[in-house]
Image (cartoon, helix red, strand yellow):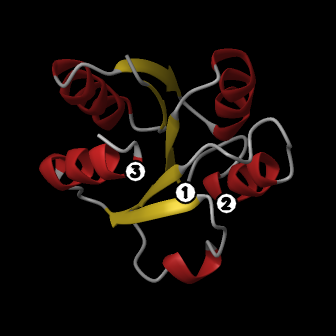
Amino acid sequence: MKKILVVEDDPDLRELLKMRLEANHYEVVLAENGEDGLTKAETEKPDLIMLDVMMPTLDGYTMSQDLGSNEHLRHIPLIVMTGKQYMEELFQSGQVKAFFTKPIDTKEVLKKIKSVLGE
């Protein structure tokens, strides 16, 4: 079973994604900010990370840079979610495989996850 780390500060969206992903047979690990997300990325070794941009403590952009500079984590593909339009230009990393503007369409997200994970 593939493991997905969801890093999202909105508790409702975090739980919605968890339910949708688990219903599609993914193991889900949750983090409510970038700092917690980095810790869980290191300990849980997810197959994919879904990452919000605007979060307290450590934002998604900084977290993505930290992931990219860590030789043990830079291979993990990222799907970036944001409520702000035009943020895509900030994320030039090869780790970023998709970019969704909120409100997200969970069906489209699931299709992209399957594609990124080769399913």
Q: Which mark is residue 61?
A: 2
**Which residue type does callout 1 highlight?**
Val
Label 1 neighbourhood size at 10 Å, few (<14), some (14-19), many (20+)? Answer: many
Label 2 neighbourhood size at 10 Å, few (<14), some (14-19), many (20+)? Answer: some
Q: Residue at x 63, y 17 (%)?
A: 44
Image height of 31 relative to 50, above or below: above
Which residue does the numbered mark 3 point to in the structure image? 116
Q: Specify the farthest residue to the front.
A: 118
Quadrant, the C terminus: top left
Assess whether mark 3 and mark 2 are in contact (beta carbons under 8 angstroms): no
In the rendered structure, the answer to whether residue 60 lies left or right of residue 116 reads right
Image quadrant where residue 91 sits = bottom right
Q: Residue at x 67, y 28 (%)?
A: 41
Answer with mark 2 or mark 3, whichever residue precedes in sequence.
Answer: 2
Which residue does the numbered mark 1 point to in the structure image? 53
Answer with mark 1 or mark 2, whichever residue precedes in sequence.
Answer: 1
Answer with mark 3 or mark 1, whichever residue precedes in sequence.
Answer: 1
Secondary element at tag 1: loop
Q: Nearer the viewer, mark 3 or mark 1?
A: 3
Relative image position of residue 84 (x, y in whole percent) = 43, 71
